[in-house]
Image (cartoon, grey):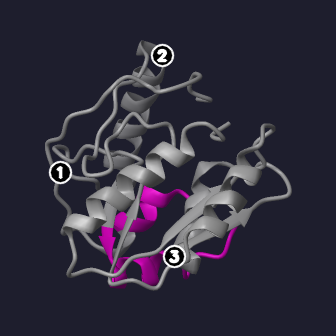
């Protein structure tokens, strides 16, 4: 359900990357079978910009499968993954969530610390940056239902958090 938010998110990314002239970049937009016209918006953005690529799923496979599809198509030295809801500015990495979702996050936090040896002070977010060697290790996973942060932790323990700002969701409500 991102037909209205994607153009703004892409605009923010493009504006930020104009400041970072030392980097070439591509944008991969993954439509996880959204019931609105998200795929049409992706097609429009692909037609408008040479460095935007669209990936469309025939049915909903979930956020982690969508992230993995984008990672498999990427080839850069650094890869940044972010959601399309506009909550996080293109140069920031954090979000605010409802109390129910925060409770789920706390359970997830405990499980990743116990099962995956995640450092206690590491905050997990769906907006993150990784180096190419981490991506290469992550995309070796070929089974169903990937857990992206688990794959990052499998590849490296050299992880840190970055303090950021965030804003209210631009449109709609979370699917979580």
Using residue 108 as the reference point, say whether residue 20 is left or right of it. left
Is residue 145 in view?
Answer: no
The image position of residue 154, as x and y in percent, is 38, 70
| Above or below, 30 relative to 120 | below
Residue at figure coordinates x 47%, y 27% from the top left = 170
Q: Quadrant of the C terminus?
A: top right
Provide the residue designation for mark 1.
161
Q: At 54% across and 25% down in the image, what residue appears?
A: 171
- Element at label 2: helix
Q: Nearer the viewer, residue 51 or 121?
A: 51
Of the image marks 3 and 1, the number of the one nearer the N terminus: 3
Q: Is residue 152 left or right of residue 142?
A: left
> Which comes before the other along the chain, label 2 or label 1?
2
Whole-percent x and y of residue 153?
34, 64
Q: Is residue 136 a member of the stretch shown in magenta?
A: yes
Res. 109 image quadrant: top left
Q: Quadrant of residue 56?
A: bottom right
Against 57, is 84 above or below? above
Q: Nearer the observer, disc 2 or disc 3?
A: 3
The label on residue 100 is 2
Q: Are marks 2 and 1 in contact (CB under 8 Å)?
A: no
In magenta, the rendered stretch is 130-153
Name the residue nearer the viewer: 104 or 85: 85
Residue corresponding to mark 3:
51
Image quadrant where residue 20 sits: bottom left
Residue 69 image offset from top left, x and y in percent: 62, 69
Residue at the spot 75% in from the left edge and 43% down from the top edge: 34
């Amino acid at each position: 359900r991102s037909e209205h938010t994607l153009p703004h998110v892409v605009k923010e990314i493009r504006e930020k990357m104009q400041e970072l002239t030392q980097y070439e970049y591509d944008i991969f937009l993954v439509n996880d079978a959204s019931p609105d016209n998200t795929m049409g918006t992706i097609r429009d953005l692909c037609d408008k910009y040479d460095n935007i690529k669209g990936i469309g799923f025939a049915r909903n496979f979930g956020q982690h499968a969508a992230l993995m599809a984008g990672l498999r198509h990427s080839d850069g030295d650094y890869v940044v993954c972010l959601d399309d809801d506009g909550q996080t500015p293109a140069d920031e990495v954090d979000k605010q969530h409802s109390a129910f979702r925060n409770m789920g996050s706390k359970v997830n936090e405990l499980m990743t610390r116990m099962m995956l040896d995640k450092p206690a002070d590491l905050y997990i977010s769906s907006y993150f940056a990784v180096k190419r060697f981490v991506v290469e290790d992550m995309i070796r996973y070929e089974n169903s239902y990937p857990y992206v942060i688990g794959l990052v932790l499998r590849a490296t323990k050299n992880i840190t958090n970055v303090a950021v700002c965030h804003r209210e969701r631009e449109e709609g409500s979370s699917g979580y």
